[in-house]
Image (spheres, helix red, strand yellow):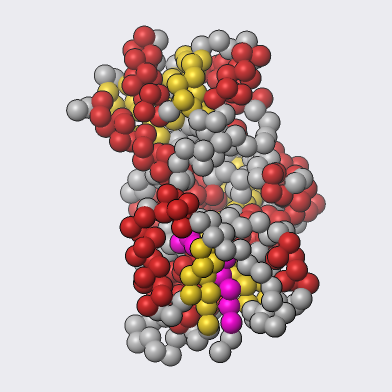
Amino acid sequence: MPNAQIIGLGRSGIAAARLLQQQGWQVTLSDSASAESIAARNGSESLQQQQQSLAAEGITVKLGCSLTLDDADLPQLIVVSPGVPWDIPVLVAARSKGIDTIGELELAWRHLQSCPWVGITGTNGKTTTTALIAAIFQSAGFHAPACGNIGNAACELALESGARSEESSSQNPPDWVIAEISSYQIESSHDLAPRIGVWTTFTPDHLSRHKTLENYYNIKAQLLRRSQLQIFNGDDPYLHKMGVKHWPDAYWTSVKGRDSLLGDPNRGFYIQEGWVVSQNEPIVKVESLRMVGEHNQQNLLMAVAAARLAGIEKEAIQEAIANFPGVPHRLEHIITWQGIDFINDSKATNYDAAQVGLSSVASPAILIAGGEAKAGDDTGWIETIHAKAAAVLLIGDAASAFAERLKQSGYERYEIVETMAKAVPRAAQLAQDHNAHVVLLSPACASFDQYQSFEHRGDDFRQLCQRLLD
């Protein structure tokens, strides 16, 4: 029986373990975090249930244990969860020994590559674009689930499909796989080759892991080079600069009209007179999308481009866009209280995303920001705060550093409140004092200093906002 090691007791790691066990592998699932740490992250009841369930399925679980390579008993396969750095010594050593070392998404690809994939990557915008594409494909009648960083782990989809399972009598393989793919997942996927690849934006992010902007770019570019058809946001400054010289066969988009398109305009998708247009044919009205901001118009263009390249008729596109509810935690309207809109943009985990979020709401706004800071250029974000924020409330580990940065820039209307529980009621009070139209959570930070995830942070914000209505 072949031996596989799975690193990371998260949703993707568990799905990978179950998929391999189903295929006849002897599977060990390890996580370097202690049982106590994982329980705090996932909930103690959930952890206990997971351990019991996995053990019953014949999967060995080792907690507080890092993978080691014993030459007497080397695994034939190592599968890595997205949060595990690709360059840690044990993985470098495994690859040097010729052990098949891959990410969870690559494992799913091996089981689902008979289905065409749409792969969406980018620094920002990929979740909304992925959700829009999935909605359009589903409106057209396709079984086209979203997976990766959105929806299911990709291996969960492979499990549900009964892929390569002789015992499964209820196979339901997708017509299309719509995958949101991070740089971490591309890094550990050397064969994944979508039918359609989409690159939404490119700005500095994850540099603590990828070290240089060039390395980060090259990782993203791998996915697009392996894609049969390529769609690029031509309004993104960095992608625009790389342009047709680097991507001669790509389909380009622009919210600025036909004349702003890169490449052959007959292959482009653009906005003109309030319509998304391709080859001089109006496809869908921009106002049909109930999401604010020019960045969402860019996301719409890329989603429509993917749909048209897949042969989807414009009627299905129009229906999907008209009914699209938006994406949780991305400029998500929570409540209106005393005429003030409370908006959850918890997914804005870097400066660029937070700048887009603040730019998209009505001013003046009360901004809640902070968390676990990331490396990056905050200049544009700070400028937008000066222009649009009546006050800024700072939470989490980054609060003191952000306060100093705002002070240095000449912005004095900030307060360190430390926690979301203090931030929401204080924001409500300040909004009334400043006659602000909006309270916006747009942290510009990761969430792991105080929360399990950006979703957990957004959910906390939602619950605290709801209390204002009690």
Residue 137, x across and y down, in percent? 43, 62
Number of labels in the image equals 0
The residue at 41%/43% (across/down) is 456
The residue at 45%/53% (across/down) is 36
Residue 440: quadrant of the picture = top left
The residue at 36%/55% (across/down) is 44
Task: Please state, as top left, top right, bottom left or bottom right, where the N terminus lies in the image.
Answer: bottom right
Q: Residue furthest left?
A: 470
Residue 431: quadrant of the picture = top left
Residue 315: quadrant of the picture = bottom left
Is residue 218 something that shows in the picture? yes
Quick check: is 8 in the magenta stretch? yes
The residue at 51%/42% (across/down) is 448
Task: Please state, as top left, top right, bottom left or bottom right, where the C terminus lies in the image.
Answer: top left
Q: Left of 423 or right of it: where is 17?
A: right
Is residue 108 something that shows in the picture? no
Residue 407 vertical position relative to residue 244 in the rendered view, above or below: above
Residue 115, x across and y down, in percent? 51, 75
Quick check: is 361 in the magenta stretch? no
Q: Left of 90 or right of it: where is 383?
A: left
Q: Nearer the viewer, residue 232 or 218?
A: 218
Residue 26, x across and y down, in percent? 53, 82
Q: Nearer the viewer, residue 262 or 358?
A: 358
Q: Nearer the viewer, residue 243 or 222?
A: 222
Q: Nearer the viewer, residue 39 or 154?
A: 39
Residue 117, x across and y down, in percent? 54, 67
Q: Which residues are magenta?
A: 3-11
